[in-house]
Image (cartoon, rainbow, N blue to C red):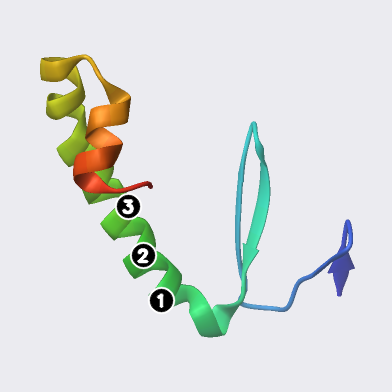
């Protein structure tokens, strides 16, 4: 099945917010979830650093681009 130009199959995971919609194929769910959790952990680690140093640029230099 195709929805707005994206192929969607039964069991695929669909995520939507005010910025858009993403379709994650069922075969890649575990990999994508793991990466999303890693990014979430990195973001939460960055918050106190940004609050302390008032610099997103320094946080990206320390933690890498997310």
The spot of residue 25 in percent (x, y) is 61, 76
Question: Which residue appears at 69% of the width and 78% of the height?
Answer: 10
CA gap, disc 2 to disc 1?
Answer: 6 Å
- Which residue corresponds to mark 2? 35
Q: Secondary structure under badge 1?
A: helix
Q: Residues within 10 Å of mark 1 (few under 14, many from 20)?
A: few
| Image depth: mark 1 or mark 3 in front | 3
Instruction: Give the vertical position of 30 relative to 6 (above or below).
Output: below
Query: Which residue is under mark 1?
Result: 31
| Residue at left offset 20%, top offset 35% | 46
Q: Nearer the viewer, residue 26 or 44?
A: 44
Dot 3 and dot 2 residues touching (CB under 8 Å): yes
Residue at 16% in and 40% down: 45
Where residue 50 sits in the image (x, y, percent)?
A: 20, 23
Element at badge 2? Answer: helix
Task: Name the residue carrying label 3.
Answer: 39
Placement of 33 over or under 43, stated as above or below: below
- Left or right: where 61 falls relative to 18: left
- Residue contact between numbered discs 2 and 1, judged by CB atoms under 8 Å: yes
The residues tagged by marks 3 and 2 sit, at their Cα atoms, a distance apart of 6 Å
Q: Quadrant of residue 4?
A: bottom right
Nearest the eye: 48 or 64: 64
Residue neighbourhood size for the residue with mark 2, other residues' Cα within 10 Å, grouped as few (<14), some (14–19), many (≥20): few
């Amino acid at each position: 099945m195709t929805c707005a130009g994206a192929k969607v199959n039964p069991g695929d995971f669909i995520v939507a917010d005010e910025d858009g919609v993403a379709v994650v194929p069922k075969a890649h769910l575990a990999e994508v979830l793991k990466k999303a959790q890693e990014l979430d952990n990195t973001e939460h680690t960055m918050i106190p650093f940004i609050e302390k140093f008032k610099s997103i640029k320094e946080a990206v230099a320390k933690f890498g681009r997310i």
